Image (cartoon, rainbow, N blue to C red):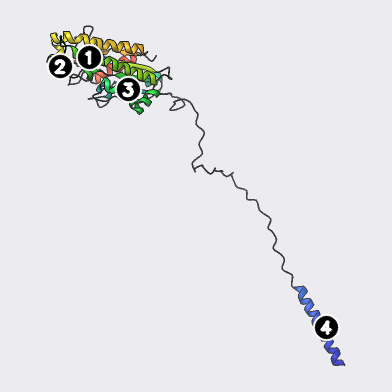
Amino acid sequence: MRLDFIFRLSVLALAFALAACSSAVAPTAAPSTPTPVAIVPTHAPTIIPPTATLEPTRAAPTLTPRTATPEKIVWDYVALGDSNPSGFGVGGNSYVPMFANDMEHDLGVEVHLINRAFNGATSGLLLQRVQAVERVRQDIQNAEIVTIDIGANDWENVIASYQDKKCGGADNQDCLRALVQAFDKNFDGILDAVTGLQANNPTHLLRTVDLYTSNSELFALMQKPEIFKVVEPYIDEFNAHIEQSTTAHHGQVVRLHARFNGSDGTGNPKQFLQRDQDHLNPEGHKLVADMLRELGYK
């Protein structure tokens, strides 16, 4: 009886002990969601669109026409012609860059010089370029001023043909007449192309240079009175057309023939020529630049 009581008492005590152990172990709670912590940057981040590149931020450009700096306007100056404007024999320092410097000084602009002159150019070759070479045409279209100095190389071999009585015609002057006629047509075509490309630029300036008689071997035959008497009227006709066509296209002419050779055309401009007595020397280029400057900018 006692043993049965004791047994039951032991079972009851064990049950109470197990219950106490169960209550002492806390149940595992479901993980709680952490409260988000706002990370405040010290400066606002740059948001880059998908197509943007990682470049420094730049202010939007001011769309003022053709300006190099806020203070200076840019003038494009295109020079066309032969070996004189290209700077043959003077290291490229022809009247063209001299005149560009004069314009910068006189007008307070920045001149972008594009010298398209080349040695050996004739009026026919230059006509082809201004009509067909796109980069030349684009340069002309954008230019504020264009100078044209062409025609001397057209005379190559013509005087010799006359001297050798191979010029053609009853009077042996057909080659001289053909020369002038071809030049007139070419020169008109050149000016038509130039002014046509600049039709939308009403303020553009056009300047041309007429033909002087040098004292080179090529023209030395002109110093013989009997030859000079025949040839000089064709030179005058040549230059008269330069004047006429330039004026018709609202340009102005540097009258170099009158300055170099005098009113009768017999003057020898040797002080302005290189040793070849044909191309301009630095003094000659300075004179042409000064004459361009004297024409002004209107």
Vertical order, 276 against 27 (above or below): above
Residue neighbourhood size for the residue with mark 3, other residues' Cα within 10 Å, grouped as few (<14), some (14–19), many (≥20): many
Specify which label sits upstream in the sequence, 3 or 2.
Answer: 3
Image coordinates for residue 85, horizontal then vertical, percent: 28, 22
Q: CA distance from mark 3 to mark 2?
A: 31 Å
Whether residue 83 appears in this view of the structure is yes
Specify which label sits upstream in the sequence, 1 or 2.
Answer: 2
Residue with the mark numbered 4: 12
Instruction: Work out which residue is located at the far left of the displayed protein and give it.
Output: 164
Image coordinates for residue 246, horizontal then vertical, percent: 33, 13
Q: CA distance from mark 1 to mark 3?
A: 27 Å
Residue with the mark numbered 1: 178
Specify which label sits upstream in the sequence, 1 or 3.
Answer: 3
Residue with the mark numbered 2: 161
Q: Is residue 169 left or right of residue 11?
A: left
Given this view, does label 1 or label 4 mark the residue nearer the observer? 1
Q: Is residue 56 left or right of residue 148?
A: right
Residue neighbourhood size for the residue with mark 4, other residues' Cα within 10 Å, grouped as few (<14), some (14–19), many (≥20): few
The quadrant of the picture occupied by the C terminus is top left
Q: CA distance from mark 1 to mark 4?
A: 143 Å
Q: Residue at x 16, y 10 (%)?
A: 228
Given this view, does label 1 or label 2 mark the residue nearer the observer? 1
Q: Is residue 231 left or right of residue 15?
A: left
Image disc number at residue 256: none
The quadrant of the picture occupied by the N terminus is bottom right
Specify which label sits upstream in the sequence, 2 or 4.
Answer: 4
